[in-house]
Image (cartoon, helix red, strand yellow):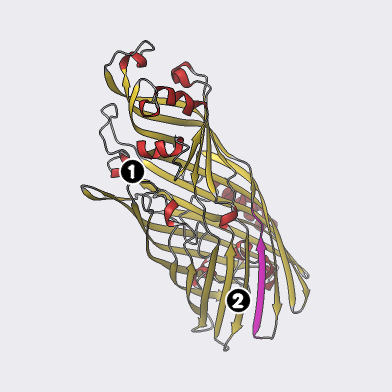
Amino acid sequence: MKRGMILLLSVFLSALTLGAQDANATNGMNLEGYGPIAHAMGGASFAYWNGTAAMMGNPATLSFFGDDYWLDIALGFLGPDVDATVTTPAGALSAESLSDAFYMPALGFLMRRGSMTYGLGVYSQGGMGTEYADDSWMSDPSMGANTALENGLVNRSEVGIGRVILPFAIDVHEKFTFGASVDFVWAGMDLQMAMSEAQFRDLANPAAQNIGTASGSMVESFGMMYEPFGGTGISQLYHAYFDFSNDSDFTGEAKGTGFAGKIGLTYNVTPKLTVGATYHTKTFLGDLETDNATMSMGVNIDDGILMGGAPSGNYVDYVMDVSGKISIRDFEWPAMMGVGAALEATDRLMLACDLKLVQWADVMEDFKMSFEADNAAANGGFAGQTLDATLFQKWDDQLVVSLGGAFDVTKELVVRAGYNYGKNPIPDKYLNALFPAIVENHISFGAGYNFTESRAVNVSMTTALSAESTNGGNGTDIPPVASEHSQFNWQVMFSNGF
């Protein structure tokens, strides 16, 4: 047993080192199901035993296993297919996201002592991710050639949330269980986002601001040079480009950590019917921060101003790169409340249903970035200055419905199927092609094979049906962009009780 516990500890330390890879959106930014048992049943998980992945659902169901110890080792895959199409006077231009494969390891361990169950788990919560190449239409947001750029601009986003979970569950009596968990939460974000001149003017002009706001000493200094705002020296802005990104598959460049918690309960109404309920708190995260950020502005500038002298009347294309620190302010994961039921309809058929409300409106009102330029001489007139940018989000709360069934073909083999619906929480007006969390309908399948009563393998597959939304342009001079998003996802898990 000592060797076994040492092995388990080693596996957990490895999982903590790896973390969880950034994931793509399904129910908003949440995965549609956690663990292949629930995943195959449309995500329904609140009222029956579905393995240690219940740490991400209803922790009260962790009491439903009968061994002294239980270990789950899992791997998930998300395969998003995302396109962004802009409407221009010359016709429609389409760009395909290159982010089409995300892998997420997961691990859960339980220990039962009498009526009480304890555990530890490492799971990916969810996120979003897209990447548009430097030769797509998004690489030149103002759609006017800037000769100072050798290549186009990559537009990329990755947001990932992971949790280390310490759950506890207790059999209060034979019909009633209670569970809770304390979650250590980490978040990471990469962002390479190009904004057009029209978008920048919308942000910086208090009379416009359809898509967001921009303020700070950098905006004021730029405005003194930007001729459309009455300044002198810059005739045109080709792009404003935020860039903080790394090559890691498991953590973003801007990072933050914090805590959250869950409580849950189950009640056996009859020997065949169990109901469950759970509440997940909003996270308490610090700002996501990195000192390795760049903001660049592609401009057509008077070369006399560029050299620090008087205007010459001769304009050249130039890219102004400013290095510094960026903070993503007030980024949190939402609270969730849900109820569910599981019915043993026959000796071989179980049906399950969950309803949950994800409170996105409380945490996705705005996306706020604060940039502080380094004092380096290379940052020129912007050294030490700041920029605060807000992009309006105004997400709605999301109702998610999960329906599933499991049929015992034999004593060893069980097959599962389900359906998951989560209403698109993003208003069309504020849809951004970098964050297209718009899919709604999911169809799921899966199977499990029990080698013994305490050893099994489970697999699942989900198809997220194609969804499309158009943001309408968000302003008279910003062309509308349509995003189309579908997915194919799978999960596999090996389980062993002892």
Query: Which quadrant: the N terminus?
Result: bottom right
Magenta stretch: includes residue 46: no
Picture residue at 61% right of the left edge, 74% below the top: 340
**Which of the two residues, 406 or 308, is positioned nearer the viewer here?**
308
Picture residue at 26% right of the left edge, 17% below the top: 314
**Which of the two residues, 179 or 112, is positioned nearer the viewer here?**
179
* Residue 4 drawn above or below residue 173: above
Residue that badge 2 annotates:
453
Could you tell me if residue 246 is visible in this image?
A: no
Q: Identify the residue at the far bottom of this view.
A: 346
Classify residue 131 as left or right of residue 370. left
Classify residue 377 as left or right of residue 331. left
Picture residue at 29% right of the left edge, 26% below the top: 148
Classify residue 144 as left or right of residue 168. left
The amino acid type of the residue labelled 2 equals Glu
Dot 2 alpha-carbon crowd within 10 angstroms: few under 14, some 14 to 19, many 20 or more: few
Residue that badge 1 annotates:
477
Q: Main secondary structure of the magenta part?
A: strand
Query: Which quadrant: the C terminus?
Result: bottom right
Closer to the eye: label 2 or 1: 1
**Which of the two residues, 1 or 12, is positioned nearer the viewer here?**
12
Q: Identify the residue at the far left of this view.
A: 90
Image coordinates for residue 185, horizontal then vertical, percent: 62, 49
Image coordinates for residue 354, horizontal then vertical, percent: 58, 73
Dot 1 alpha-carbon crowd within 10 angstroms: few under 14, some 14 to 19, many 20 or more: few
The amino acid type of the residue labelled 1 equals Asp
Q: Quadrant of residue 335?
A: bottom right
> Mark 2 vs mark 1: which is more N-terminal?
2
The magenta stretch is 272-282
Could you tell me if residue 369 is visible in this image?
A: yes
